[in-house]
Image (cartoon, grey):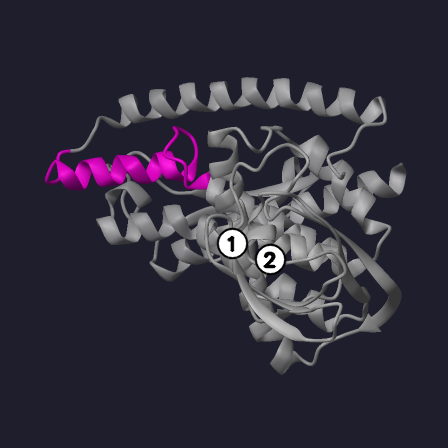
Amino acid sequence: MILTILVGVLVLSVLIIAHELGHFIAAKATGVPVEEFGIGFPPRMLGKKWGETVYSINWIPFGGFNKITGEVDPSVPRGLASRGYGVRLLVLGGGIIMNLILPFILMTAAFMIPHSAVEGKVIVEEVAPGSPAEACGIRPGDIVLSADGRPVRNYADLSRITQLHLGLNLELTLTHTDGTTETVRVVPRWKPPEGQGAIGIVTRTQDVQILRESLPFWQAIPAAIRECWDVLALYKNGIIGMVIGTVPFVPAGPVAIVQVTGEVAHAGISPVLELTAFISIAIGITQMIPFPALDGGRIIFVLIEWARRGKRISPRVEGIVHSIGFMILIAILVLVTYQDIIRWVTGGSLIP
């Protein structure tokens, strides 16, 4: 339990610090003063001023923060709100940019670190009548060799690639029971009948082997790029699935992230890096939402000012809107955290 909490808090802190570092780098690069960049939250334990900025380590060991001069008030000299549209958008979006860059770095490291991989023959056991699989000629006993040109080494590979192609053509290369090889096209369904799955097959992985593998950096980099792109596509499909009712909406807050990260940590460093990358992408996308107090909400105020040809919304009004949004977010966080705690103490988990 203690290890789970420590690993989870560490991962969440790294993600928060990385987000704040994105704002910090953008502010420094554009000449916007940063009064303080802190690791952890006050009260302050240590602090050192270099130039205009105090760099601090604080007693509450969770996350970090920036204090950027003049975030809302345009009357503050050299402050953020007094700068042009481009500078403000870059600084406000710096955290989002960092949350979308970090996964690439983490995924690259995950592929380079030796990790376990499951490999075997993926064999079709059942084909549902009237399913896309039956229509394209997939039969029980077929071995799935590849999907979308990617090798299929286990059931998870096939399931993941299938989810990436919901509603789209997916090429499967099969070896039939008579020894012939064929490539077929199938369209995975968004709303399959219960128990059938998107394609309409049941598979098993035969002759399973657990291998240790790692990639050299020149292979890890393109693999990381593809993995990050896949995660974005899966995230998009997950949102669509929730809207149409095929994916359950299960809100998760910091407590759930700590729990899941701690559980994944038992599988090794590489899976933790992959999970952290996924969470970072989720945080980046969430911060894009145009809701007050989120980065997306702050960006919307800049875009409104631009659309109004420089006519600003009152700093007081903007401050009130963000304060209300922050209180709403805190209320939601409290409810989600309560749900996460109940799930954890009763033995539940977000990991199937």
What element does badge 2 sit on? helix
Eyeballing the image, is 270 above or below 313? below
Query: In the image, residue 8 lies at what x, y percent?
Result: 75, 42
Q: What amino acid is at disc 1?
A: His
Q: Residue at x 70, y 19 (%)?
A: 338
Q: Residue furthest front?
A: 178
Q: Camera-side residue: 120 or 306?
A: 120
Task: Identify the image quadrant of residue 64.
Answer: top right
Eyeballing the image, is 329 above or below 236? above
Residue 161, numbered circle = 2
Eyeballing the image, is 76 above or below 116? above
Asked whether disc 1 touches disc 2, contact meaning CB atoms under 8 Å apart, the reply is yes
Give the side of residue 155 with respect to residue 94, left or right. Answer: right
Residue 315, numbered circle = none
> Can you see residue 180?
yes
Query: In the image, residue 9 lies at what x, y percent?
Result: 74, 41
Eyeballing the image, is 344 above or below 93? above
Which residues, given as a range, are shown in magenta?
287-311
Q: Residue at x 75, y 44 (%)?
A: 261
Q: Camera-side residue: 181 or 288?
A: 181
Query: In the image, residue 80 lies at what x, y percent?
Result: 32, 45
| 9 drawn magenta | no
> Residue under circle 1?
165
Q: What amino acid is at disc 2?
A: Ile
What element does badge 1 sit on? loop
Give the side of residue 83 with respect to residue 4, left or right. Answer: left
Q: Camera-side residue: 327 or 240?
A: 240
Q: Residue at x 77, y 60 (%)?
A: 141
Task: Give the Cα separation between the discs numbered 1 and 2.
Answer: 7 Å
